[in-house]
Amino acid sequence: MTTRRVISVWLPDWRTDRLQRRRPELREKLLVLIRAGKGGDRIVAVNAVARERGLAPQMALADARAIAPGLTSLAHDAETELLELEALARWCGRYSPLTAADPPDGLWLDVTGAAHLFGGETALLKAVQADMSRMGLACRAAIADTPGAAWALARFGSAAPAGIPPGAQKEHLAALPVAGLRLAPETRRQLERLGLKHIGQLYEIAPAALRSRFGVAVPQRLAQALGREKEPISPLLHEPAYYATLRLGEPVGTLSDVEAAIDILAARVTGRLTAHGKGARRFTLTLYGPMGGRFPLAVGTSRLTSDAAHVKRLFRERLAALENRFDAVFGADAFSLQAEGSGALVPHQGELGGAAAGTAETAILIDRLQARLGRDAVLEFACRESHVP
């Protein structure tokens, strides 16, 4: 019988790294993500530069500005963050068909029986970390028989790709902190106050005693990590690929040629979406040069869409925004278009007075403005509570 093997991928700076991928200029800035809280805005995440200056999650934004007046603050978007984490989990289908997001900053890969395809477990872990690094994502990864053991090792073990041999969870987890058991913060503090700081210290305590003193989570997480209790992973269902390619006999290099390719690809991709009753929120066009060059171009929508005409307009706005920065002189002999963030389209019944139509027209206008000016350039007023009178 093949031993189960699971990889836990930890992306410690996922919340800021995902933004820095789209806006590389943020890498050199003191970046913090914030959300409204009692008494004012509070920090949810910081990038590496801000961390070096002493900024940290849970800190009040006002206090952070006192330490670093020049910091850059952006609103934390938890919904988009999760969607992008799930998209990354699906991308990891190249390693295993069984992948899942592990919010807020991790991934699961069940690679049972698959490691030999990559040259062994160590080579597979190195490939995962190298691919994440190429995408600008800080990453640590570990492999073990159980999700719990891999999770603990990825976060509290060696920074290098690490693995626990089959059946050896107990000895390898003993020296790791109890935080590696994925416990609630208050439960972890209770254990530490009683001097129970390492996982190995829990081995000699009866499960019933742990349950009566700390609740069901401690003995359950310990049993799962050691392989005494099964912990299933619910893999993401990989959606049909809403993807189309166009190959040409010879390179083309004018904007009109690119627009013609977009027209063809948009019709194909949105046709497939419509056939499945779905729409998408993001479309990525990639131009491939004959010498191996790649030029990706993406547009997003504020609501799910399968409207080919709308997608075409957004790409035209995007191309117009690039102006002289778009250099198609090198020529492109292949194009691809992929729809991402797909979901079921829900029909909306019309209303008297045209309110629904007005909302749809507003969404289309927002999409076009964001395509031309950039996502962060289009804002809206919103009410929020404040302690300021």
Image (tube, helix red, strand yellow):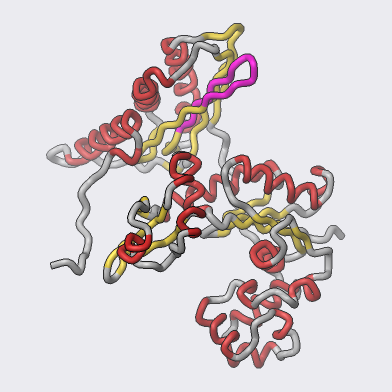
Quarter of the image that includes the N terminus: bottom right
- From the image, give the main secondary structure of the stretch colored magenta: strand
Residue at (44%, 13%) from the top-left corner?
Answer: 260
Q: Which of 348 and 40 is in front in this view?
A: 40
Residue at (78%, 71%) from the top-left corner?
Answer: 172
Residue 241 coordinates in the image, percent (x, y): 57, 34
Q: In which quarter of the image is residue 373?
A: top left
Quarter of the image that includes the C terminus: bottom left
Residue 18 makes an appearance in the image: yes
Q: Which of 158 and 308 is in front in this view?
A: 158
Residue 309 makes an appearance in the image: no
Residue 196 coordinates in the image, percent (x, y): 65, 86
Q: Residue furthest right?
A: 1
In the image, residue 373 sits, relative to residue 136, either above or below, namely above
In the image, residue 148 sits, relative to residue 136, either above or below, namely below
**Which region is colored magenta?**
283-295
Residue 245 coordinates in the image, percent (x, y): 57, 22
Residue at (58%, 20%) from the top-left corner?
Answer: 288
Report how many numbered discs are placed on residues in the image: 0
62 vs 304, left or right, is left
In the image, residue 232 sits, relative to residue 362, either above or below, namely below
Residue 128 coordinates in the image, percent (x, y): 69, 47
Residue at (54%, 83%) from the top-left corner?
Answer: 189
In the image, residue 159 sits, relative to residue 364, either above or below, namely below
Specify whether residue 254 is painted magenta.
no
